[in-house]
Each structure stands twice: as C-alpha cells, then as structure tokens.
Image: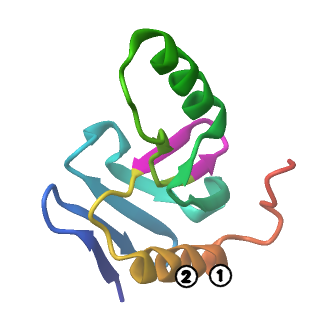
C-alpha cells in the first residue's frame, strides 16, 4: 500500500512511498519529479538552512567599502537524493521538517542495505 507524505502545499511537494519505488512530485523544480527505485538509491540526506560564514564575511568586507549594510547570507535547506546515476536536490522552503525527517527515515528503511553510498 502506498503512503503519501505531503511536504509542501504551494508549490506542491510530495513523496509517495511504494513497495519497491518512490515517487517525487516537485512542482517548484519539475526535473526532480518522477519514479525512483529504492535499489537505485545510495543515500538520502537533509541539509538544514545555515549561515554561510565565508560568503557573509566577503559581503561584509565589500559592504565596508561600498557603504551598504548587508545581513548574513544563508544557504537554503535541501533534501538530497543520491542515486546511482544522478543527484536530486529538493529545496525545502515552507516545509514541515518533522515530515521531512520522517520521509527520510522511511526511505532509508526501505533502501537495500547494500546501497551504502560507496558502491
């Protein structure tokens, strides 16, 4: 039985977990949308939103010379799927991070153990 987890309403982002595959519906970036087999999955990871201190420092230095005050530069949160033949990067704005954690755990459980990312 398929389980659908809706991560975002607008633009729609949902993941449907099937027995041997999962489907990603990503309206924001349609290149991510499609059906993928757990057997093709090497790794799935969450990258939370965080400050990029290198870029922030460079912006502050430039701001000193130009007179523009600028805040911190933040990297966006992403969900990364490393497949055998491609890498999917899903932007996680306006999403429920508890659902994101849950979907990554469920996918990791269904992924064959021999797909450890180092094959």
Front position in the image: 71 or 119: 71
The answer for how far apart the CA atoms under marks 2 and 1 are is 5 Å
As helix, strand or loop, the secondary structure at mark 1 comes to helix
Q: How is the image coloured?
A: rainbow
Hey, which residue is sitting farthest bottom in the picture? 1
- Dot 2 crowding, Cα within 10 Å, few <14, some 14–19, many 20+: few
- Residue 103: give x, y in percent of width and height: 48, 77
Residue at position x 51%, y 24% in the image = 59
Q: Residue 97, relative to residue 69: is it above or below?
A: below
- Residue 95: give x, y in percent of width and height: 31, 68
Hey, which residue is sitting farthest top in the picture? 65
Looking at the rendered structure, the number of numbered marks drawn on it comes to 2
Q: Residue 45, relative to residue 65: is it above or below?
A: below
- Residue 69: give x, y in percent of width and height: 38, 29
Q: Which residue is mark 2?
A: 106
Main SS category, magenta section = strand
Q: Which quadrant of the rendered structure holds the N terminus?
A: bottom left
Q: Which residue is mark 1?
A: 109
Query: Badges 2 and 1: C-beta atoms under 8 Å apart?
Result: yes
Q: Residue 21, relative to residue 106: is it above or below?
A: above
Front position in the image: 90 or 84: 90
Residue at position x 22%, y 45% in the image = 28
Q: Residue 2, relative to residue 85: is it above or below?
A: below
Front position in the image: 73 or 68: 68
Hey, which residue is sitting farthest left in the picture? 10
Give the label on residue 69, or none. none
Q: Quadrant of residue 6?
A: bottom left
As helix, strand or loop, the secondary structure at mark 2 comes to helix
Q: Which residues are magenta?
A: 81-90
In the image, is residue 83 part of the stretch drawn in magenta?
Answer: yes
């Amino acid at each position: 039985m398929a389980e659908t987890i809706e991560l975002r309403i607008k633009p729609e982002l949902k993941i449907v977990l099937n027995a041997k595959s999962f489907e990603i519906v990503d309206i924001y970036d349609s290149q991510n949308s499609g059906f993928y087999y757990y057997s093709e999955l090497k790794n799935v990871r969450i990258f939370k939103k965080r400050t990029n201190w290198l870029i922030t420092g460079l912006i502050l230095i430039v701001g000193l010379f130009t007179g523009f005050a600028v805040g911190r530069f933040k990297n966006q949160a992403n969900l990364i799927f490393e497949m055998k033949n491609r890498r999917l990067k899903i932007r996680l704005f306006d999403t429920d991070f508890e659902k994101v954690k849950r979907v990554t755990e469920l996918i990791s459980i269904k992924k064959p153990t021999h797909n450890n990312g180092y094959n």
